[in-house]
Image: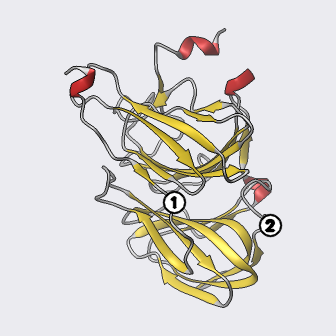
Amino acid sequence: MSRQEERTYDLLIKASAPREGYTKIVGRGEKGLKHLEFGRLILPSGEWNDTTGDCEVVLDIYSGIASLETLNRRFDRLGERKNVFDGSATVIYLPPGTEYRLEVVEGPVEIAVFSATTASSQAGVTVIRPEDNIVTHPGKENWQRHVYTAIGNNLRAAKMIFGETVNPSGNWSSYPPHKHDAFIPPNEVPLEEIYYFQLNPDQGFGVIRIYTEPTDPAPMDEIYVVEDGDTVVIPRGYHPVAAAPGYTLHYTWAMAGDVRQPGALSDDPRHKWVKEA
């Protein structure tokens, strides 16, 4: 199949105006997703009651302060940031079958909500505080970025791997390009992924390319300009990201698959030489 004959995929979801309550952005059965759903929860005041049902749920507090109550646990005053550019995240992990209540302490509270279907989990209700994030700075020069892994090898979640990445102005991330769509354990396992982008200043933009090998049975080569509040689904393929000069680019990422193995990915062999340069 020639480049001109490649299929066109629609993996970009443009930002929508914030709305009070929960707003689903994308979910299972859409854009190639099998496991994940993503939405935003905005609470100016009061409380929010919900249940995780047949999913494990991750709540990432972007701004505001809230208290969490479950059947036999309570966590007061969670959340320290004014926005996602104000340090590491406070993240809540909720296993399937958990009823919970969020109480607004200092609003508005804005939360990213990710879920993955699963019958059970070895992890219980867990709060990952800013100091508990695993912070790394992979890459160098103009492809160094700051990665904050909230849920990785530190928690025995059923499917979910979760965190945030910050690209400094003009820098690349997910570079050299990597993928996680083939079952080649322990080196690589299939994990679908969602990126939710935010920019500072918010009129900024970035670029993401999602592509496969040209010999792939269903080749893909998509390039999207991403702006503040945009979401991109990555069902498969390599997926490098670049921030425009003058703008810091932040994205929240969640991965899930039938086999959970943090760090199991493959670099594009054409570009992995940069690690040794």
- Camera-nearest label, 1 or 2: 1
Percent position of residue 271, x then y: 52, 15
- Residue at 32% across, 31% down: 220
- In this view, the residue in front, 91 or 28, is 28
Image position of 133 (left or right of 9): right
Dividing the image into 4 quarters, which one contains the C terminus? top right
| Mark 1 Cα shell of 10 Å, populated few (<14), some (14-19), many (≥20) | some
Q: Which residue is mark 1?
A: 15
Question: Which is nearer the N-term, disc 1 or disc 2?
Answer: 1
Where in the figure is residue 241, as x and y percent of width and height? 56, 35
Q: Place residue 30 in its image quadrant.
A: bottom left
The foreground one among 221 and 76 is: 221
Return the mark for residue 80. Answer: 2
Which residue extends farthest front?
A: 203
Q: Position of residue 42 (x, y in %)?
A: 60, 76
Q: In the image, which disc is placed on residue 268?
A: none
Across and down, in percent, residue 125 comes to 59, 70
Q: Is residue 273 left or right of residue 51?
A: right
Badge 2 amino acid: Glu
Residue under the point 54% across and 54% down = 156
Q: Quadrant of residue 221?
A: top left
Q: Are marks 1 and 2 in contact (CB under 8 Å)?
A: no
Q: Amino acid at mark 1?
A: Ala
* Residue at image coords 50%, 61%: 122
SS at circle 1 = loop
Q: Please tell me which residue lies in front, 18 or 175.
A: 18
Q: Give the residue furthest to the bottom.
A: 46
- 253 sits to left or right of 148: left
Give the CA distance from mark 1 to mark 2.
25 Å
In the displayed structure, would residue 180 be above or below residue 40? above
Q: Secondary structure at mark 2?
A: loop
